[in-house]
């Protein structure tokens, strides 16, 4: 395996980590409108992800930085090509981060309500747009011989990519609902479980169509395995959820995300961003990658740092492992 | 296309606006993380409640700042790809690596441990909780280092070769990129300026409370810590600035000649105090100068030769082909002066403050005050004279103003260092006009610029109001839970239904 293949896998791992982790915190953000009945419940939801959402988001920054370093051409084409969707995502992430930190810093109800609305929309929009972006990457976009994206904003809103957006939106919401059931006590936990079933069924329909479409378009034997794993894990997650095995259910919804992202990357390889105009203009792991020297240094860094990161991030989850409910939310936060 | 709205111009404005804005929060974050960690260490070691109150107070202000620093940092990472895709293609092999290192080593650290610190007050034993804020502090410093190494490569590219076939620069020696003298000097300078900034922030807010005679005993502690930080930070900023300046004279003579409005090379070269010139004709109309000083600053020798703007322009034309290699000279000249002027003014005010509030044991009996009284500001060493109430008030007022000075200095420092390098984006290797995204339209860049500027303006108002609220409120009252943190990780099981110490 050459180093640029290793880095293709590592970039896939970083995106998988990002969708696994920020997937559920986006989902919880969406649930603040779908699940919470009153403000204390909203606050319970927000607090289930309070200590971890920031660490989760760094997976995106690392995926971005690693793409810049390992595949500069990919980074350049992707971010200049998907300019406006990326702009919307960035605005959402800015507002979302500030919303979490500033919401509880003033007691006025208006202030808190506005930030809560912001949390809902800035969780929902990126959850949808990431699916649209990946749909387009896998399907291929108009890239010319200089590796420049020559399509328009509207080209990105094709049926396949939009369906991809619905898949990530529903899948993250499901993942978030399962996480909520795992992390809360009382009434909200029961309702999270019920909602998880409903959202999970919708997710299963969207995901099955999208993944089959991908398989027919650009799949091979390996991606078929990933597809089967993704769908089976999703069904198993639903079963576990119904059986009240919340830990299992969350692990399995995580497996669904891992397998679905793996499937996208498998059907992409050895391309990183195919051109829909001409096969020779596609960005591949070879023509988009950095020099072997840079990749070697990066590999050392990743080999040493990644296990450490996983260790202390897991520790965070362990420290905050207790379930919370409305009784843990103090009347006023100051 | 109208040149004023060309994508290159817009992309440069956007980079300038988002970077300067981001950098209002970065130095405060770096220094407040370390100062908060220091205060919390003092609490853990001495168990004095005033240190815990100070930790909570400054920690809260730190959190309000870091939230903005983090979210505006996301834009920084992605705009290279959005607006500067040809730059990214050309230098990604080199420039991407420190960025990826930053994310993997520093960001993960910072963001994970900050979550633990914020929510961990009732979940972690004292010492482990303390370790978390130190981890955050180390993370912020590492992060700054990697970014400054990347930027230094743009100022002075090393450890690379040009791959003609691929049309890009490729890394040959990463260690050299991380440890070249430009990177070391820039990190030293930027980090010490960050502490000057945080110290002045602390002094300003403490002075504000002392002026209003509120939270006196807590604010006296913070005032001293802030003053010492200002002086140490300011001194190191000046020393590192001098070092960095000498490196710049060697590596980017054009930038330094522009900073001095020195049009033609001179031996010895004078330091310019004030200049007003004609850029097209290439000379100054008015100039007030100190003879020989520039030679000394550049080469440690009052008699040495320093090349001027016109000389460097000519030699660069010979080397790189026809063109104008001069940056915007008024911006470089005044940027350099605002940076030094505002930075050193805050240092001077800090120095004055520390002298005026000398330790109690140096003061005669009648000048000493009780713990809950505003300290007298003392004029003479061992003397009998204190400043009157009016003068004391004036000092507090000036100290409050000083809060903003390092921020202005930092901003001009960056504007000077980045604009002084133009027309190069990577000095001597890649020009800015070849770095923009060719596929991105004027409308797209304009849209993103308007969106970011508007959003940043709104957030600035929100942030400042929130800061003001928490500054005015002063240090919080401590509760029983604050004083008795848990002894084991995860908190104590017996009070399972107790409200969390911190919740959003």
Image (cartoon, rainbow, N blue to C red):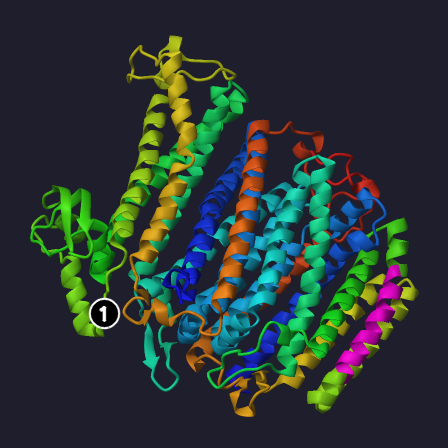
Q: In the displayed structure, would residue B18 be above or below residue B374? A: below
Q: Nearer the viewer, residue A309 or B312?
A: B312
Residue A289, percent across and down? 48, 81
Q: Quadrant of residue B198?
A: top left
Q: Nearer the viewer, residue B4 or B375?
A: B4
Residue B459, percent across and down? 56, 45
Q: Quadrant of residue B401?
A: top left
Asked if the stretch drawn in magenta spans residue A105, the answer is no
Q: Nearer the viewer, residue B224 or B20?
A: B20
Question: What range is drawn magenta here?
Answer: A195-212
- Confirm whether residue B10 shows in the render: yes
Q: Assign the N terminus of chain B to one quadrant of the image.
A: bottom left
Say which residue label 1 marks: B323
Q: Quadrant of residue B58?
A: top right
Q: Assign the C terminus of chain B to one quadrant of the image.
A: top right
Q: In the displayed structure, would residue B1 be above or below residue B52? A: below
Q: Residue at x 67, y 57 (%)?
A: A315
| Residue farthest toward the front in the current orientation of the protein | B2
Alpha-carbon neighbours of circle 1 within 10 Å: few (<14), some, or many (≥20)? few
Q: Residue at x 52, y 55 (%)?
A: B450
Q: In the displayed structure, would residue A266 be above or below residue B252? A: below
Q: In the displayed structure, would residue B369 be above or below residue B68? A: above
| Residue farthest toward the right in the current orientation of the protein | A243
Q: Residue at x 65, y 38 (%)?
A: A105
Give left or right: position of B276 versus A221. Answer: left
| Prevalent SS, magenta region | helix
Q: Residue at x 55, y 22 (%)?
A: B215
Q: Read off the chain for label 1.
A: B
Give left or right: position of B71 versus A187. Answer: left
Q: Secondary structure at mark 1?
A: loop
- Confirm whether residue B502 shows in the render: no
């Amino acid at each position: 395996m050459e180093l640029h293949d290793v880095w293709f896998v590592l970039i896939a791992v970083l995106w998988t980590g990002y969708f696994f982790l920020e997937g559920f915190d986006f989902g919880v953000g969406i649930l603040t409108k779908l699940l919470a009945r009153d403000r204390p419940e909203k606050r319970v939801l927000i607090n289930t992800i309070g200590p971890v959402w920031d660490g989760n988001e760094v997976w995106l920054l690392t995926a971005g930085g690693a793409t810049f370093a390992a595949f500069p051409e990919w980074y350049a084409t992707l971010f200049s090509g998907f300019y406006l969707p990326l702009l919307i995502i960035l605005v959402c992430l800015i507002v979302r981060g500030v919303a979490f930190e500033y919401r509880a810093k003033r007691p006025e109800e208006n202030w808190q309500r506005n930030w809560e609305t912001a949390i809902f929309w800035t969780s929902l929009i990126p959850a949808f747009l990431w699916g649209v972006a990946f749909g387009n990457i896998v399907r291929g976009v108009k890239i010319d011989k200089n590796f420049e994206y020559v399509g328009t904003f509207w080209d990105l809103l094709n049926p396949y990519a939009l369906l991809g957006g619905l898949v990530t939106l529903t899948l993250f919401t499901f993942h978030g609902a399962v996480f909520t059931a795992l992390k809360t006590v009382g009434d909200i936990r029961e309702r999270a479980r019920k909602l998880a079933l409903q959202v999970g069924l919708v997710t299963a329909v969207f995901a099955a169509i999208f993944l089959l479409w991908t398989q027919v378009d650009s799949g091979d034997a390996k991606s078929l395995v990933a597809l089967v794993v993704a769908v089976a894990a999703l069904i198993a997650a639903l079963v576990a959820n119904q059986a009240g095995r919340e830990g299992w259910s969350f692990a399995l919804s995580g497996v669904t995300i891992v397998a679905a992202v793996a499937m996208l990357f498998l059907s992409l390889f050895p391309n990183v961003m195919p051109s829909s105009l001409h096969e020779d203009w596609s960005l591949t792991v070879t023509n988009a990658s950095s020099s072997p020297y840079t990749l070697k240094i990066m590999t050392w860094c990743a080999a040493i740092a990644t296990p450490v990161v996983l260790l202390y991030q897991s520790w965070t989850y362990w420290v905050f492992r207790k379930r919370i409910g409305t009784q843990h939310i103090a009347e006023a936060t100051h | 296309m109208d040149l004023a709205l060309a994508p290159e111009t817009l992309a440069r404005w956007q980079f300038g606006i988002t970077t300067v804005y981001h950098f209002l929060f970065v130095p405060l974050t770096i220094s407040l993380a370390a100062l908060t960690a220091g205060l919390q260490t003092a609490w853990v070691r001495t168990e004095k409640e005033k240190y815990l109150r100070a930790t909570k107070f400054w920690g809260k202000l730190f959190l309000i700042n870091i939230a903005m620093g983090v979210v505006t940092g996301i834009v920084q990472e992605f705009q290279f790809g959005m607006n500067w895709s040809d730059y990214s293609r050309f230098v990604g092999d080199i420039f991407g690596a420190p960025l990826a290192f930053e994310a993997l080593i520093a960001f993960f650290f910072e963001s994970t441990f900050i979550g633990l610190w914020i929510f961990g007050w009732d979940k972690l034993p004292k010492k482990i909780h303390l370790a978390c804020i130190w981890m955050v502090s180390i993370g912020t410093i590492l992060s700054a280092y990697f970014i400054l190494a990347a930027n230094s490569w743009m100022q002075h590219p090393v450890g690379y070769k040009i791959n003609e076939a691929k049309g890009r620069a490729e890394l040959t020696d990463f260690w050299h990129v991380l440890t070249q003298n430009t990177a070391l000097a820039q990190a030293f300078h930027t980090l010490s300026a960050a502490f000057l900034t945080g110290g002045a922030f602390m002094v300003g807010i403490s002075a504000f409370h002392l002026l209003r005679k509120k939270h006196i005993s807590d604010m006296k502690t913070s005032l001293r810590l802030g003053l010492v930080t200002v002086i140490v930070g300011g001194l190191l900023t000046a020393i590192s600035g001098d070092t960095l300046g000498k490196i710049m004279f060697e590596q980017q003579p054009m930038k330094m000649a522009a900073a001095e409005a020195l049009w033609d090379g001179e031996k010895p070269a004078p330091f310019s105090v004030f200049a007003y010139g004609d850029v097209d004709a290439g000379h100054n109309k008015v100039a007030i100068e100190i003879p020989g000083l520039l030679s000394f600053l550049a080469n440690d020798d009052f008699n040495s030769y320093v090349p001027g703007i016109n000389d460097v322009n000519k030699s660069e034309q010979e080397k790189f082909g026809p063109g104008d290699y001069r940056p915007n000279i008024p911006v470089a000249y005044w940027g350099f002066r605002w940076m030094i002027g505002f930075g050193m003014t805050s240092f001077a005010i800090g120095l004055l403050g520390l002298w005026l509030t000398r330790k109690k044991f140096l003061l005669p009996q009648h000048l000493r005050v009780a713990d809950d009284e505003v300290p007298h500001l003392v004029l003479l060493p061992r003397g009998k004279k204190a400043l009157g109430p009016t003068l004391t008030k004036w000092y507090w007022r000036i100290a409050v103003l000083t809060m903003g000075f390092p921020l202005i200095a930092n901003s001009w420092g960056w504007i000077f260092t980045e604009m002084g390098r133009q027309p190069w984006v990577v000095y001597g290797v890649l020009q800015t006009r070849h770095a923009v995204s060719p596929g991105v339209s004027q409308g797209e860049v304009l849209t993103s610029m308007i969106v970011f500027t508007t959003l940043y303006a709104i957030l600035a108002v929100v942030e400042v109001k929130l800061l003001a609220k928490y500054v005015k409120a002063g240090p919080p009252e401590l509760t029983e839970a604050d004083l008795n943190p848990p002894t084991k990780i995860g908190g104590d099981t017996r009070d399972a239904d107790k409200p969390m110490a911190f919740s959003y």
